[in-house]
Image (cartoon, rainbow, N blue to C red):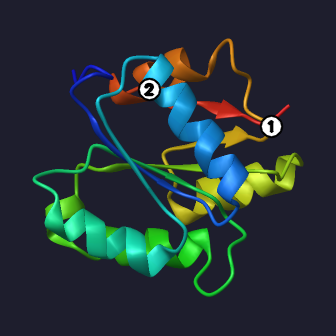
Amino acid sequence: MTSLSDAYIIVVEDDPNARLVTIDLLRLGGSDQCFSRKSADAAIELAIKLPQIDLLLVDINMPGKSGFELLDEIRAKPQFSQTKVVAVTAGTFEEDVQKARDAGFDGFISKPLKTTVFPSQIQRILNGESIWDWR
């Protein structure tokens, strides 16, 4: 079990406001090792440099590489075999969730984030629970 304060987390989000809100919520929840990048390529570059990555929170619809393409690249790298990858996106339809599940994401959290539960959702994911919150 990894605690939120010890976990290495990368937020991958092209929208600067959404990136800031997500990082702020993680820090308020106790995260000491949270980072953000605005593109899939920048996130992978950072992930390779860090000592570990416990969780990637990934927007699906980004310019350049999508969240699905990022997921495929991460899953192809053996050093990230234990890394949880969760879609954090504005998609709110059941088919969006099913597509993310079929692609191999470890969870799905819809935007806007629910500020009262987001940090506990992240801790539950770090504990090994799958979160599929899309409503």
Q: Nearer the viewer, residue 75 or 89?
A: 89
Q: Are marks 1 and 2 in contact (CB under 8 Å)?
A: no
Residue 88 in sight from this viewpoint: no
Q: Is residue 64 left or right of residue 48?
A: right
- At a point 75% along the width and 40% down the height, the residue shown is 110
Q: Is residue 11 left or right of residue 61?
A: left
- SS assignment at label 1: loop
- SS assignment at label 2: helix
Q: Is residue 103 left or right of residue 11?
A: right
Q: Position of residue 67 (x, y in %)?
A: 58, 69
Instruction: Give the mark nearest the N terminus, 1 or 2.
Output: 2
Residue 74 in sight from this viewpoint: yes
Q: Which residue is mark 1?
A: 112
Q: Residues within 10 Å of mark 2 (few under 14, many from 20)?
A: some
Which of the 4 image quarters holds residue 22?
top right
Q: Is residue 51 left or right of residue 33?
A: left
Which residue is farthest left?
Answer: 51
Residue 27: assigned label: 2
Q: Quadrant of the N terminus?
A: top left
- At a point 16% along the width and 58% down the height, the residue shown is 50
Vertical comparison of 51 with 1: above or below: below
Q: Nearer the viewer, residue 62 or 16?
A: 16
Q: Position of residue 91 (x, y in %)?
A: 83, 53
